[in-house]
Image (tube, rainbow, N blue to C red):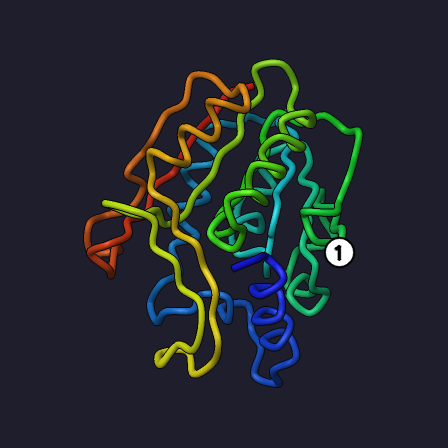
Amino acid sequence: MKNNDALIFFKNMSKNKSLNPNSLKLAKNSDFSTIDAKFILSHTNKNTKILDLGSGSGLVINKINDKVKHILAVEPFVEFTKYINTNTNITIINKDILNFKTNELFDLVTMFAVVQYFNQDEIVKIYTKYKNNLKTNGKLIIKGQFGVEDDVIISGYSDELKTNYYSQYRHLNKEIDILRKIGYKNIEVVDIYPPECNRWKNTHFYAIIAEK
């Protein structure tokens, strides 16, 4: 599984005539963006600058932009970003995060519901690259599903989604080890959602906070 496989899935979704801001929430009743927004805001203030990678339709950043200084939102698909609040302090860049580059420094780099769409080699490159965009003591905040006992890899046709779907839910300890080897410090894991939000026994939602 590579990120290109996942990008094909999302490109096809972006062309769907029934596309709406909640389309990226693949499971019914899975919009936890209010919890996500509250969690991010617990690490911000009015002067915080955020680099949000894989912003999608802006469900999270639209809820927090008025409480921080600026958000740079990176999302490859224009069709998704048309739902983001563009008349505010959000700047949108339509590029994929593997190829996007900037010299700007940020207090926070956020990746919510993103990391599972990259294989291990790709995520090492991403964590390494964007560490350089953090200010001293800046934080990377990740939220995603992680394997409970081992890696969980989805690659192929999904009966639920009626299409091919690709994700790599790495074991939580593996993800922490990747971050530690790259040089992140003060790594913290938070069980971010109520238990009923975790649909599957072999994966679990966590937020990971890692400091530069």
On the picture, is 205 further left or further right than 113?
left
Relative depth, front residue between 98 and 86: 98
Disc 1 residue crowd, few under 14, some 14–19, many 20+, Cα 10 Å: some
Q: Residue 186, percent across and down? A: 42, 17
Res 149 → quadrant: top left
Relative depth, front residue between 84 and 167: 167
Label 1 belongs to which residue? 94
Relative depth, front residue between 124 and 211: 124
Relative height, residue 15 to residue 86 (above, below):
below
Q: Mark 1 belongs to which amino acid? A: Asn
Q: Residue 152, percent across and down? A: 34, 55
Q: Residue at x 56, y 64 (%)?
A: 6
Circle 1 sits in a helix, a strand or a loop, which is it?
loop
On the picture, is 210 further left or further right than 66?
left
Res 89 → quadrant: top right
Q: Residue at x 66, y 79 (%)?
A: 15
Q: Residue at x 46, y 52 (%)?
A: 116
Total marks shown come to: 1
On the picture, is 23 further left or further right than 134?
left
Q: Residue 28, percent across and down? A: 35, 71
Q: Residue 46, percent across and down? A: 60, 27
Relative height, residue 98 to residue 58 (above, below):
above
Res 134 → quadrant: top right
